[in-house]
Image: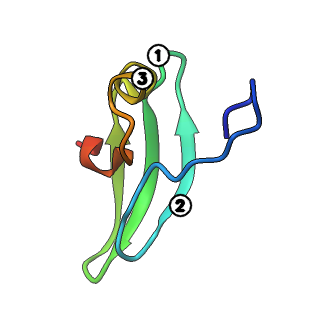
Amino acid sequence: MNMENNEVKQITNVLGGAFMPSVDSTGDIAFATYKSTGYKIAMIKEFKRRIRQNSDHASNLIN
């Protein structure tokens, strides 16, 4: 959710789900994902900078 204008956008497209997001002071987002092999930690690095450059879903930004 964009706190400035209350706009809501999907930023992941993860089969199985993305849970418990956390944003650090640099804008990196860490979250838990679930697959058939169990839970994993995923990161979207430099999210704020990258989302400005890419108007599409950020699912391609997951490292």
- The disc placed on residue 19 is 2
Q: Percent from the top left, x then y, of residue 33? A: 40, 63
CA distance separating discs 1 and 2: 20 Å
Q: Which quarter of the rendered picture does the C terminus lie within?
A: top left
Q: Is residue 2 left or right of residue 9?
A: right
Q: Residue at x 56, y 39 (%)?
A: 22
Q: Percent from the top left, x then y, of residue 53? A: 33, 23
Q: Give, as a three-letter code, the residue at label 2.
A: Phe
- The disc placed on residue 5 is none
- Badge 3 crowding class, 10 Å Cα cut-off, few under 14, some 14 to 19, many 20 or more, is few
Q: Is residue 21 left or right of residue 8?
A: left
Q: Disc 3 or 1, which lies upstream in sequence? A: 1
The residue that mark 3 highlights is 52
- Badge 2 crowding class, 10 Å Cα cut-off, few under 14, some 14 to 19, many 20 or more, is some
The figure's colour scheme reads rainbow
CA distance separating discs 3 and 1: 15 Å
User: Relative to residue 40, is residue 58 depicted above or below?
Assistant: above
CA distance separating discs 2 and 3: 23 Å
Q: Percent from the top left, x then y, of residue 54? A: 33, 32
In the rendered image, the residue lying farthest to the front is 55
Q: Give, as a three-letter code, the residue at label 1.
A: Thr
Closer to the camera: disc 2 or disc 3?
3
Q: Number of numbered discs present?
A: 3
Q: Residue at x 75, y 29 (%)?
A: 5
The residue that mark 1 highlights is 26
Q: Disc 1 or 2, which lies upstream in sequence? A: 2
Q: Secondary structure at mark 3?
A: helix
Q: Give, as a three-letter code, the residue at label 3.
A: Arg
